[in-house]
Amino acid sequence: MQLFALGINHQTAPLSVREQVVFHAENLIEALRELVDRRPVKEAAIISTCNRTEIYCSTAEPHAAVDWMAGYHSLKPQQLEPYLYQLPQEKAVKHVFRVASGLDSMVLGEPQILGQFKQAVRTAQAAGTLGLLLNKLFQRTFAVAKTVRSETDIGAATVSMASAAVGLAQRIYPAIDEQSVLFIGAGEMVELCATHFAAQHPRRLTFANRTLERAQALADRFLGRAITLNDLPSQLAGHDIVVSSTASTLPIIGKGLMERALLARKHRPMLMFDLAVPRDIEEEVGQLDDVFLYGVDDLGNVAREGMDVRTQAVAQAEVIIENQVTEFMHWLGNRELVPSIRALRDTAERARRHEMERALRRLARGEDPQVVMEQLSRALTAKLTHAPTHALSHAREDERKRLAELLTRLYQIPRQE
């Protein structure tokens, strides 16, 4: 078994590919169990966000995880492989440390990814697919991310996609306080965007969700109003800015619905942010004359523009991560030696018990205890030194020097001058 990571992200795959391999939260436990139960995979955890889908696992056959990921999403492996990164052992460790620390994010230093990793771990625990190896990996990952954020200024360089959305809105509209904003969904991204937009005091905030209760909770917090998704056809036209981020597998807003809304608005422009993966708003909507449509990749590019990337902070973070990768790989290497160490101790224990039983029988017969103890110690010494002595005596000429140095190190023998 070896540690293995595979996935796609905003750097390796376009949104049209990323949205095909999303794992939805309500199906994630079942997916994890299927991966571990049906494939040569011992442990597994999956993180699936708008910017990345990654599988971390312990497996003897890494490619089996690739085949499963493709098959689960009704794709052929060759359809995914051009966009996939496959990272064994040390590369996987370094990758997860960098991602959790915000160094591999669309927006440098963004903190949301750490919370998403913690949720992925909780889900794997609930599925029963998190074992010793991955648990150790993720606990070390969280510690590394905390160290990077506390000892560098990486977090200070963050410009979130939510603040980027507000910045775009301010470019298009002279004053946001004169606009009505509609939020579709009730998750973390919608809440974050609502916080940034609410600070600009828009004329009206509306929250739409499949369940009215969750929409109402956000409406109460931000002094807005709540509607259901069924109300969208009648309510959409009354809003100037739309922010959508749901877990729906199908688009919520199609071209026909938008055309009717624009007609009702007398073609006043509408700014739309689709932050969902898969997308909530049909791609064709962006082709309408009076619509400004931005997706997650667009906002990521905006967030990076004008951001003062603190090169020194990134370099400091990379040093911290390199050191932590070395430490983790040392732990992993020691873990792989456990069977050999256990076998060595078992062999020594069998020799000890055998000689101890012989000594006790001789003592029971009334033999001199001092003689018995002397012979016991000699017998143990002979047994414990027989194997290395035999190996050294029968070593090939080209092996002798290296083997002698190794025995000197193992037995801490003083070097002879």
Image (spheres, helix red, strand yellow):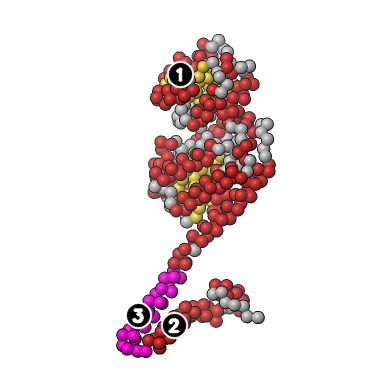
Query: Which class describes the residues within 10 Å of circle 3: few (<14), some (14-19), or many (20+)?
Result: few
58 in relation to 118, above or below:
below
Q: Secondary structure at mark 1?
A: strand
Mark 2 and mark 3: span between their CA atoms?
13 Å
Characterize the local packing of mark 1: few (<14), some (14-19) or many (20 or more) Cα atoms within 10 angstroms.
some
Viewer-closest of 233 and 148: 148
- Main structural element of the magenta stretch: helix, strand or loop? helix
**Up-down relation of residue 368 to residue 108 (above or below):** below
> Is residue 367 a member of the stretch shown in magenta?
yes
* Residue 377 marker: 2
N-terminal-most mark, 2 or 1: 1
- Give the amino acid type for the residue marked by disc 3 in the picture: Glu
Residue 357 has which mark? 3
Local packing at callout 2 (Cα closer than 10 Å; few below 14, some 14-19, many 20+) is few
- Give the image location of residue 332, x and y in percent: 51, 57
Residue 163 to residue 312: above or below: above
CB-based contact (under 8 Å), mark 2 and mark 3? no
The stretch in magenta equals: 343-368
The reply to whether callout 2 and callout 1 are in contact (CB within 8 Å) is: no
Based on the picture, tell me whether residue 144 belongs to the magenta stretch: no
Q: CA distance from mark 2 to mark 1?
A: 86 Å
The earlier-in-sequence mark between 2 and 3 is 3
Where residue 174 appears, as percent x and y from the top left, is 63, 16
Residue ID at (39%, 44%): 126
Position of residue 344 measured from the top left corner of the image (x, y, whole percent): 46, 70
Q: Is residue 297 visible?
A: no
Say which residue label 1 marks. 225
